[in-house]
């Protein structure tokens, strides 16, 4: 899918939400970045994705986070470009990033809650997604 460099694609939106969760606690951990990289490299949703776009997407997320209503603006961009059928997918990917370092901070939990609200996710489906992410990222 070829879009202009200033247009967010559905794949960009998925990346943006993963980066937003990672940056929500003002500390982007290596494990979170590695999880994002693994997701982009291996999931079918990212087939054909130009990974060079990740830098532009991250700059967009960081610029929005520096604004007072930046999170609302991010959700507005996402709602414009991400099909509703991928809302649960975006939540699942965000949960994987949040769980990847083994700890969920208040800011990550608040952002995930905001995602559930913004995307009108079913509470039981969201709980199942959360539990699955936690299970995938447990250590032995």
Image (spheres, rainbow, N blue to C red):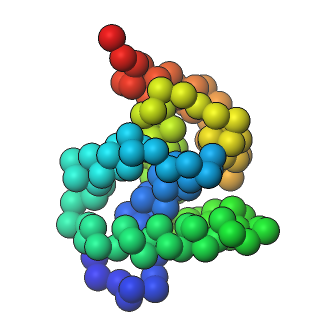
The residue sitting at 77% across, 68% down in the picture is 69
Q: Quadrant of residue 72?
A: bottom right
Residue 28 appears in the figure = yes
Report x, y in % for residue 94: 49, 44
In this picture, residue 81 sits left or right of residue 25: left
Residue plotted at (40% across, 19% down) = 138
120 lies left or right of 136? right
- Residue 61: percent from the left, percent from the top? 56, 67
Can I make out residue 10 in this image? no
Q: Nearer the viewer, residue 53 or 84?
A: 53
Task: Name the one closer to the observer, 113 or 104.
Answer: 104
Residue lying at the far right of the rendered structure:
68
Tell me: residue 107, above or below residue 75: above
Name the quadrant containing residue 121: top right
Residue 48 % position (x, y): 20, 66
Residue at image coords 79%, 68%: 68
Q: Quadrant of the N terminus?
A: bottom left
Total marks placed: 0
Q: In this view, does 2 lie above or below 77?
A: below
């Amino acid at each position: 899918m070829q879009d202009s460099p200033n247009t967010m694609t559905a794949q960009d939106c998925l990346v943006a939400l993963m980066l937003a969760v990672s940056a929500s606690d003002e500390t982007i951990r290596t494990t979170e970045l590695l999880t994002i990289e693994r997701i982009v490299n291996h999931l079918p949703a990212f087939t054909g994705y130009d990974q060079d776009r990740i830098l532009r997407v991250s700059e967009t997320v960081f610029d929005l986070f520096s604004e007072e209503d930046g999170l609302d603006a991010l959700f507005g961009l996402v709602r414009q470009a991400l099909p509703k059928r991928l809302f649960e997918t975006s939540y699942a990917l965000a949960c994987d990033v949040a769980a990847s370092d083994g700890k969920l901070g208040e800011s990550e939990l608040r952002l995930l809650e905001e995602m559930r609200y913004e995307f009108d996710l079913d509470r039981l489906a969201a709980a199942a997604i959360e539990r699955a992410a936690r299970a995938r990222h447990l250590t032995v």
